[in-house]
Amino acid sequence: MAEALKIGVAGLGTVGASLVRIIHERQESLAVSCGRAIEITAVSARNRDKDRGIDLSGVTWFDDPVDMAKNGEIEVLVELIGGADGAAREAVEAALARGVHVVTANKALLAESGVALAAAAEEKGLLLNFEAAVAGGIPVIKAMRESLTGNTISRVYGIMNGTCNYILTRMEKEGLSFEDCLKEAQRLGYAEADPTFDIEGNDTAHKLAIMTALAFGCEISCDDIYLEGISNISQEDIRAAAELGYRIKLLGVAQRTEGGIEQRVHPTMVPHDTVIAQVDGVTNAVAIESDILGDLLMVGPGAGGDATASAVLGDVADIAKSRPGIQTVAALGRPAKSLTPYKKARMRSHEGGYFIRLRVVDRIGVIAAIARRMADNQISLESIVQHSANGGGEAPTKTIIMVTHATTELSVRNAVSAMESDGYIVGKPQVIRIEKP
């Protein structure tokens, strides 16, 4: 049997500790399946004294992950620090420069510097693996860059953030407000103390940017993603969606169009009877539409120590099975130099159905005015619902809910803007796109 593959783990949080434990527990079976043992020879983390419930005896400790990447007795750097810059990026760059393979779960780093890092790995014949960076334990990266070779992918989309999916699920099933669900997610550890990165869609955007590059052979372009979070979703939207036969999910969507590549992250109404609508809680789901295979949907745990560690370990095992000095798989599915420049499609040309909720002054002529604005923008309605006017001391209002047939983003935005200028809308209109997988 070949000599053991020596790895260094940078970051011993939930995922790092799970990875170390699993490798220790399954040494014999890993050696058999990989053809060589996997040995942790070095680690780096902030606190040496913290009890992580793992055995680190005989392992060299580095206070600085960059020092470990440069000087540790390792063949693979496993980067689990996180962040687009700082120690994470410096450690990965140092490892590649030295001739050390890299496995990372760092979506922010890849979204920011993935093409440059892929080129650096290719120059040295090294592997840069990152299955855990997108959708946790779901093997979507391997599927896209290996299993779907030869397929032309037209669209990739999915639920890629467990925090948002958990909040939307509880809002629907328990009738709770967004704020109450967020507090519970924070209490359970599903959301950070500052949840902005998750609930405003940035986390999903980073993952989507990586998948877009793999799907369409283009350079990563995280800054060109249309972005909306879920913080403005109310119980009124949840209930209206249910009445109309939909559920609300935060989706990341990338698709090829005649005008370029469209990337968007936003709350979306999906038909209640579709598989992706049934994905609840912290679970993730990724769908890929291709010409040869057809439609592929993968569902599984999108986060958590063991699920993410499983994806990291799979990447390490691939390196253990590879031939020394030969890069078997390009990091982004094709050589970095052959990636095409990203061409952004105009979001406002996006076409599909829309849910529009308006609170309007309850007076004669308002419905006719709304109909006129929709007709002016050539928008056809699939359904329209009116809810009872409010009472009390305020001027009476009512809620108008409309579902359109396929139309463009530009038409909807123009129609809603015109209605606002007419002066009968109270508060901010709600517009949610409808996807029919």
Image (tube, rainbow, N blue to C red):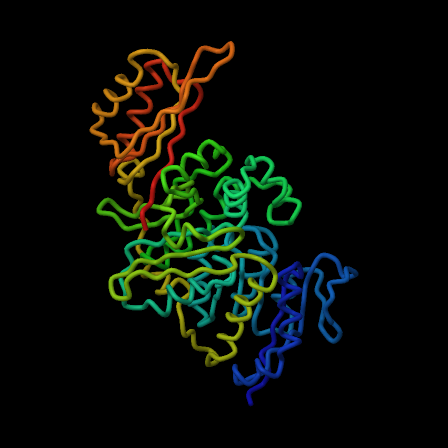
Q: Residue furthest bottom?
A: 1
Q: Is residue 61 visible?
A: yes
- Using the rendered view, name the quadrant where residue 363 is placed: top left
Residue at (34% x, 28% y) in the render = 385
Q: Quadrant of the N terminus?
A: bottom right
Q: Is residue 228 above or below residue 427?
A: below
Residue 318, position in %: x, y? 48, 75
Residue at (48% x, 14% y) in the render = 391
Q: Is residue 396 above or below residue 229?
A: above
- Using the rendered view, name the quadrant where residue 297 is placed: bottom left
Residue at (41% x, 21% y) in the render = 388
Residue at (36% x, 46% y) in the render = 271
Q: Is residue 69 left or right of residue 391?
A: right
Residue nearest the observer in this picture, 178 or 319: 178
Q: Is residue 225 visible?
A: no
Q: Is residue 376 left or right of residue 148?
A: left
Q: Is residue 197 above or below residue 37?
A: above
Residue nearest the observer in this picture, 61 or 379: 379
Residue 280, position in %: x, y? 49, 51
Q: Is residue 195 left or right of residue 433?
A: right
Residue 62, position in %: x, y? 70, 64
Q: Is residue 412 above or below residue 350?
A: above
Residue 368, position in %: x, y? 26, 17
Residue nearest the observer in this picture, 221 or 135: 135
- Using the rendered view, name the quadrant where residue 196 is placed: top right
Number of marks in picture: 0
